[in-house]
Amino acid sequence: MARVNMRELARSLGVDRSTISRALSTDKSHLVGKETREIIRKAAEAAGYRPNLTAATLRRGSSNTIGILVSDLENETFITVIRRVVAELGTPGQHPFTPLIGETRDSHQTSRELLDQFISRRVDAIISLASSDTDAEILSDATRYVPVILAIRKINGITLPTATCDDEAGGAMVAEHFAERGHQVVCQIKGPTISATFVDRALGFSRACARLGVFECEPEIVAPNATTAAGRKVGEQVLSMRPRPTAVFAHNDALALGMLETMRSAGLSCPADIALAGYNNTRISQLLATPLTTVDYPVEKVSIHAGQATKSLIADPTNEWSSRTFEPRLIVRGSTLS
Amino acid sequence: MARVNMRELARSLGVDRSTISRALSTDKSHLVGKETREIIRKAAEAAGYRPNLTAATLRRGSSNTIGILVSDLENETFITVIRRVVAELGTPGQHPFTPLIGETRDSHQTSRELLDQFISRRVDAIISLASSDTDAEILSDATRYVPVILAIRKINGITLPTATCDDEAGGAMVAEHFAERGHQVVCQIKGPTISATFVDRALGFSRACARLGVFECEPEIVAPNATTAAGRKVGEQVLSMRPRPTAVFAHNDALALGMLETMRSAGLSCPADIALAGYNNTRISQLLATPLTTVDYPVEKVSIHAGQATKSLIADPTNEWSSRTFEPRLIVRGSTLS
DNA sequence: CTGTTAGCGCTTTCAC
DNA sequence: GTGAAAGCGCTAACAG
């Protein structure tokens, strides 16, 4: 595993290391004579020279990496945001940003360890798509070292640049839709309450129900995480409630899928027996036998705002930033049209 | 963004930097007096000291990172492998390995850039879940610098440690199942042929059909990538073929989903009109209105083998390694039981 | 058990 | 337009 370094390359060409450095850089190559530059580039290529970016990082003080914290890699919405943000940051002609991706699975301990890793590896910014209220302290601690941006999941009582969806409005939309369709008894399959996202969805839904005179009953179990397996479990509870709700709002599409499964096992059909709505408008939701009514998440807008905030804060950490909330949109499909 | 470094921490405690280094390390802390060690740990904690791992990497010559190349972050199978491998490498009590994840989307150019990044950042190993035949050269070039392990997708004519599934056998299983159910005319929705994986699935299926006297017709379009959208498109072709096949083998579940959509739009039902089988046994396949017959991928085994090969080669790049192929398993569900 | 010393490979002044 | 020299923050040899 013989690696050529700058010193050796310089020696073999009879120039100084600094000339090599300049010739191979994007922003300082104009300081090198055209011929010299070409010679150096060719030689570097031929020798299979790969600059040691850890050395460059050490010297330069910035790494051209960003840390991304995500709670669940199987969640399509998160993946979309990651893709968009990475694309956003990869300005052509610049050093590209390499993402370090860490999956927390909503474990506080894991979040802490990953944040430490990110800071120790001197990422230029951290984007968290995994923030829960319990992470407030470690995230604001991290801002002492590096800009931190929150996306999708905000944390109340912390002032960090944030890009989210108006989840309270989203929850309310579903409740209003249920009311319009004449439902009298409804319930929610809630996501984990450590995340403000789910708290807001719940709040928006409950408030609207109260306002519209719809009775909301509550399952005793709360989903420990927003997955299909959890939805199945809570779903069983829901079916046993009396009076049984005629419409259910699952806090995301994965939970809704679990509920659907439970219903199928129980021989109930959707929407005839129970109407069902999800959240996120993931790809599957349209592919189901009964397409799922869901809340479309403004992924694109959230991603762009998060990406731009990140860019700006990397350029200058003292830059002004703004938090923004984007509007969701109800997509009515067969699962609530009985 | 005031960062304490080792020198300052040492000065404030009246000890040498090397003592700090030892006290904070996992493997050398026993060389430091118990009291001293405790004092140092507490002080480091209190000062919010985060070791600069890029400096440590430079000095140590290894980074405790691995590069993971993946073609599609929305593919559940890949995510599962990533999770398992990362878990496998995170030996407790050791420095944890931080994964650098790069998504190629089957672009050769992107693969090349990501590999360069990985090498330049001095990853300790590279695991590729995105290998296509066109990448043979850049991947073997990379082995000059760092161990490279292939998982899920192998490359023919290249000798690298590989963990894959016997995709030819998987394809054959589907063909045999179709024959048993009495189908006379069948076809495939093939994944992109730049990947040996899909070539093998196709080969296994076609050979078995020939052997069993089942007629296989071929759609003219090949899916440019193995996604639902592509499946939908090829699916339209399939429906227009004469004689129309009565059973279709989609090279993965995403493609199968696309085919299902097309059938629904055309008012055809599965399996009554056309039987359908997928590959991978992803979560959705069981959640569909008509659960999908599919080939269960030995993800667990592939992940473990890839993880262990990686571990071994990180420990010593000259270690012997083996390539292994694991057996898939046919899961028969409603979509082929008319 | 602790300190001293050297150096990992790069970038960046500062000279010329 | 190029070279000389210093130093980013850490770890590992070596000495005691």
Image (cartoon, coloured by chain):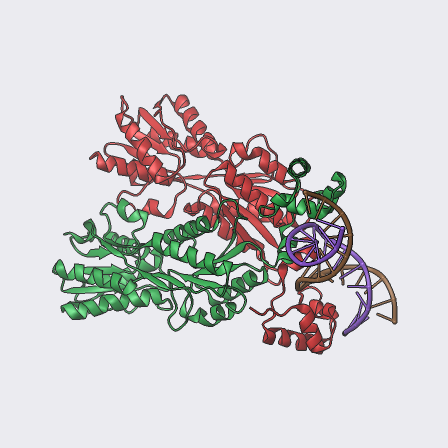
Chain colours: A red, B green, C brown, D purple
Residue at horizontal 71 percent and vertical 76 percent from the top? A36
Q: Give left or right: position of C15 versus A123.
A: right
Q: Position of residue A137 (x, y in %)?
A: 59, 33
Q: Position of residue A82 (x, y in %)?
A: 50, 50
Q: Nearer the viewer, residue B91 or D1?
A: B91
Q: Nearer the viewer, residue A284 or B253?
A: B253
- In the displayed structure, would residue A209 be above or below residue B4? above
Q: Nearer the viewer, residue B198 or B186?
A: B198
Q: Position of residue A246 (x, y in %)?
A: 28, 28
The N terminus of chain B sits in image quarter: top right
- In the displayed structure, would residue B33 be above or below residue B120? above
Inspect this view and state whether residue A309 appears.
no
Q: Give left or right: position of A119 versus B91.
A: right
Residue at horizontal 34 percent and vertical 64 percent from the top? B197
Inspect this view and state whether residue A117 appears.
yes
Residue at horizontal 47 percent and vertical 43 percent from the top? A298
Q: Give left or right: position of B191 versus B116.
A: left
Number of labels in the image equals 0
Q: Position of residue B255 (x, y in %)?
A: 31, 57
Residue at horizontal 57 percent and vertical 43 percent from the top? A115
- In the displayed structure, would residue B9 be above or below residue A9? above
- In the displayed structure, would residue B295 be above or below residue A38? above
